[in-house]
Amino acid sequence: MLDRIKALGEGAINEIRASESRQDLEKLRVGLLGKKGELTEILKGLKELDGQMRKEVGREANLLKGKLTRIISQKAEELGQKEVGKSLGMDTGFDFSLPGTELPVGALSPITIVQREIEKIFTGMGFSIVDGPEVEDDFHNFEALNIPEHHPARDMQDTYWLENGQLLRTHTSPCQVRAMFKYGAPLKIIAPGRCFRNENVDASHENTFFQLEGMMIDKNISIANLIYVMKLLLSEVFKRAVKIRLRPGYFPFVEPGFELDLNCLICNGAGCSTCKRSGWIELLPCGMVHPNVLEYANIDPEVYTGFAFGLGLTRLAMMKYGIRDIRVLNSGDLRSLKQFATV
Ligand code: FA5
């Protein structure tokens, strides 16, 4: 009988360890320890044994019962965890506590970064941000800006004309026209956007680039307001003193008009390919809105005056981040963009 208990124990333990589901385990438990289980039957038969034998068999059978109960409950717990894991898709042998694979993180274009900075500066002063179409018509891009047909100023900006008579806007100034028509005066807007010119491309000229237009119209707006806002814009963007020069500039839609140049920050004014050896970068043309432009938009120039500017946003980003060649920005080369990743 003692041999039978030993064999029963060894066989049962192996089977318990090998069982793969809680149902199999339960069948084993019932077969061993249930009402009619093999070990239960042995225990029931103890009373038929005599003296010493009953004692020995009783002890071994009870020891085995305790051991099997313990092993079965451990195995049940293990199988239960596995089943829960399986239902969660964790039965792959994969360690879910391992740290994840790092995903590549994108970066904002330097143009977007400065654009957002400038938007913050101007919205802080109560300006609204407006938009306009990249495919424009002659009226908004030229005529309403005091550049009628055959005006020589049209040649200042080499235009991509479309077959239907429309054009790719050469500057963001049509956005000021649209804003004046839509909102009238007083008006405080900025309009960042992409512009297109049929130009020879070099280190500081692209055929596709960004400008940021600005316009303020109200009673008593003067050149002093214009100069103040231009200075504020540059000091906020560069966060340090930069050298600028203001010179007269001709744009048919402003009078007087100015060219505001920035001392080239790539060569510190010494002369390089970016500034075409001049030491200066044309950056921020501006001026007082021409009365004809106000009149075109049904704003009374006797009551209102205003200033406007057309910041070269792409060039500003180049100066701010030390980008020597404008072509890098449109190249789609992710290596240059990655340098601006903030995370
Ligand atoms: C204009 O486009 C005027 N609309 C600006 C303006 C607005 C003047 C309101 C007065 C009042 P301009 O052609 O100079 O002006 O261009 C403005 C700026 O855009 C330039 O100073 C330069 O920084 C940038 N820019 C012009 N052409 C290119 C180009 N091909 N590539 C990169 N940036 C350019």
Image (cartoon, rainbow, N blue to C red):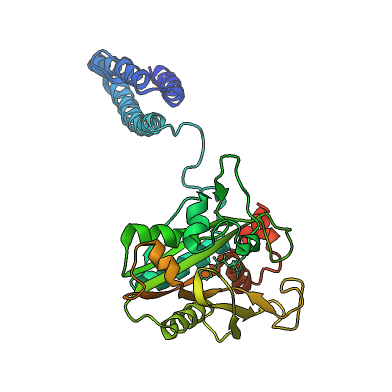
Residue 89 lies, with reference to residue 309, above or below; the image says above
- Residue 4 appears left or right of 39: right
Q: Position of residue 264 (x, y in %)?
A: 67, 78
Name the foreground residue: 186 vs 294. Answer: 294
Residue 130 lies, with reference to residue 60, above or below; the image says below
Quadrant assignment, res 214:
bottom left
View quadrant of ligand 1: bottom right
Name the foreground residue: 100 vs 134. Answer: 134
- Residue 288 appears left or right of 201: left
Total of numbered circles in the picture? 0
Name the foreground residue: 327 vs 127. Answer: 127
Q: Position of residue 23 (x, y in %)?
A: 34, 19
- Residue 17 appears left or right of 220: right
Residue 139 lies, with reference to residue 93, above or below; the image says below
Q: Residue at x 43, y 56 (%)?
A: 131
Quadrant that contains the N terminus: top left
Q: Residue at x 41, y 21 (%)?
A: 12
Q: Residue at x 48, y 77 (%)?
A: 233
Would you say residue 286 is visible in this rendering?
A: yes
